[in-house]
Image (cartoon, rainbow, N blue to C red):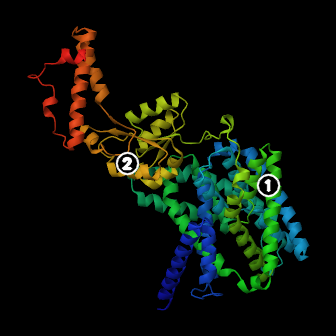
Amino acid sequence: MEHGPSLLRDGVMMLGFGLVFVLIFRRFGLGATLGYLVAGAVVGPQLLGLVGGAESKMGIAELGITLLLFIVGLELNPSRLWRMKQEIFGLGALQVVLCGLAISGVVWVATRSSFAATLALGLPLALSSTAQVLPMLQSAGRMRTPFGERAFSILLFQDLSIVPLITIIAVMSRNPADANGPPGWLLFIYTLIAIAGLILAGRFLLRPLFRIIGNMGEREMFVFAGLFTVIASAAVMESLGLSTALGAFVAGVMLADSPYRHELEADVEPFRSILLGLFFLTIGMLLDLHAIAERPLFVAGMALALIATKAAIIMSIGLLFKMRWREALALGLLLSQGGEFAFVLFAQAQNALLIAPEAASLFGAIVTLSMATTPFLMRITQRIRTEPVRLEDREGPTSDGANALIVGYGRFGQTVGQMLVAQGIPVTLIDMDIEMIDVAGNFGAKVYYGDGTRMDLLRQAGAAEAELIMFCIDNDQIGPDLVEAVHEAFPKAEIFVRAYDRRALVKLRDAPTAGVVREVMESAVKMARLAMRSLGIEEEEITRTEDHYRARDKERLKAQYESGDVRAARDRIITQDARSGIGESGAK
C-alpha cells in the first residue's frame, strides 16, 4: 500500500522541481538540460533527499534517449542520408575518432589510469549533446542551413557511434558476468541482422499498419502505434545485447520518407520531451556530489580541457572541409560540450568494472559543467563568430526546407502547389485523405498524412521556417481563432486561406491573413464569360458586365465586413429587376 503513494510523491517532487529549475534556467538562457540536471541533484539523496531510488527510475528514463533517436531518424529519409553521406561519414567520423583519441590522451595525463579505463572515460567524452544542440539550432533558425546540416551530421554520426563504443566497452569488460556474453565481432553481425530485420519490418509491416490507422482517422491509435514502434524496435535490439537507441533510430529512418512522418513526430514529441527530462533528472540524482566537492579543481580543469580540445579539433576539421574560419569556430564551440550518451557509456563502463563509481560521478560532473558553458560560450563569442553580411553568402534553406506549407491537397491545393513548384518554390504538402496521398504519390508528389490545423503538426512540418502557410482545405474549417494562433506561433509566414463562401470571408475579415480566396468565385466568373461569348455577345460588353458585377460584389462585401452581417447590402445583388448601371460601371 505504501508503494503507490511513494511513487506518486516521487513523481510530484521530480516534476515540480524540474519545472521550477527549467523555468529559471531558460529565463537566463541556459537551456532545459542543465535545469533538469541541477533539479535532480537538488531533489536527490545527497542534498534534500526528497526522492530516492534513482537506479530504479533509470530504465524508464532511458526511453527518453530512445525516443530522441527515433525522432532524429524521422528527420533523415534515405535520400537525404545519401546526400549528406560525406558530412556524416567524413566530418562526423573524423570528429569522433580524433576527439576520442585526443581526450583519452588528456584523461591519461590527468589520471594515469589503465589503458582500458582511459578509453572508457575518454571515448564517451568525444560525444556532444544532441538534446542541447538541436534545440539551439532550431531556435536560431539554422537547422536546415549548410551550417546546421554540418552540425547535425556530426551529431548523427556520434549517435550512430554508440553501438561500436558499447562494443568496445563490452570487449574490455572485467566483469565475470560479461565473460559469457557474445564477442565483439558477433555483436557486429547481430547489429547488421537486426538492422536488416527492422528495415524489412518497416517496409512490409509498419507502413501497412499506419495506412490502416490513417484510414480510421483516430489520432489515439497513431500515438499508440508510434510508441509501439519505438519500444518494439528497442526491445529487439536489447534482446540481442545491442543499443536500444540504434533500433529506434533505424525505425525512424524507415518511416522518414513515409506520408506519416509529421504525424508521428507530433505524436511522439511530448513523450520524448517528458522522458528525456526524466532522464536528466535521474542523472542529476546519481551524481556523487561528495566526490565532486573533494576535487572541484579537477572537475573544473578537466571540463576546461574537454571544451578546449574538442573546440580546437572540430574547428580544424571544419577548416579541412573548407568552412570559413568563423563558421568553423562556431561549429567547434557549439559541439564542445560532453553529451547525454556519456552518462549511458559511463554506466556501462562501471558495470563492466572498468571504472569506479567515484570516477563515473566525477566525469559525469565534468560533462554537466561543460554543458553549462555552451550557452555562455555562444553568447560571449557572438561578435567574433558573426560573418560580415554579403548577399552571395547568405544561407538559404536546403532542398528539404519548406518555403511553402500547403494544408489540403485536393483539386484546389493541387493547382496552388503545382504553380509554386513550377516557380521553383519548395513545397511541403499535408492532407488527411489516404487515397489522395496514394494518388499524389503516383504522380510524383510527396504528401504527408496529418491534420494540418494542429499546431504541433504544423511545427513538425516546418511551419517555423516557412514563408507561406496556405490553407486549401474545403468546407468551412478555417476560423479566425485558428488563423490568429498560427500567425502568433509562426509570425514569419504569410497566411493564405481558401474560403468556402462569402460567410467565411466575413468571418475572417479581421484575421491576420495575407489573402483569402473564395474557392468558386473565379471559375464561376469564367463560366459566365464563356456562356455570354457562346450567345454572341461582344467581348467588350462581356468585360463591362464582369467589371460591373465585381464592383457591386466589392461594395456588398465591404458593407458585410463593416457590419459583420452577411445579409447587409442586399440591394447590391444584381437581379432580373435591377440590371441598370452596366454601361456606367464599364465607363468608370
Residue 333: % across, % down:
74, 58
Q: Position of residue 220 (x, y in %)?
A: 42, 61
Spot occupied by residue 181 in the image (x, y as percentages of width and height): 77, 72
Q: Is mark 1 on a helix, strand or loop?
A: helix
- Neighbor class of circle 2 (other Cα within 10 Å; few <14, some 14-19, many 20+) is many
What residue is drawn where x is 46% and y is 55%? Answer: 456
Q: Where the C terminus falls, by quadrant?
A: top left
Find numbered disc 2 in the image and state the secondary structure of the residue it sits on. Answer: helix
- Disc marking residue 63: none
Residue located at (21% from left, 37% from top)? 559
Could you say which quadrant of the image residue 70 lies in? bottom right
Seen in the picture, residue 332 relative to 83 is either above or below; the reply is below
Residue placed under numbered mark 1 in the picture: 314
Q: Which residue is the site of mark 2?
A: 483
Residue at 51% x, 36% y is 445
Q: Which residue lies furthest to the bottom in this view?
A: 2
Kindly identify the amino acid type of the residue bearing the numbered disc 1. Answer: Ile
Mark earlier in primary sequence (1, 2): 1
Can residue 586 be seen? yes
- Report the Cα–Cα distance between label 1 and label 2: 44 Å
Q: In this view, does 378 lie to the left or right of 563?
A: right
Q: Which residue is drawn at 52% across and 39% down?
A: 446
Circles 1 and 2 in contact, beta carbons < 8 Å: no
Q: Return the x and y of residue 110 as percentages of the image width and height.
A: 88, 74
Q: Is residue 160 visible?
A: no
Question: Number of labelled discs?
Answer: 2
Q: In this view, does 43 lie above or below 510?
A: below
* Crowding at mark 1 (Cα within 10 Å: few <14, some 14-19, many 20+): many
The kind of residue tagged 2 is: Val
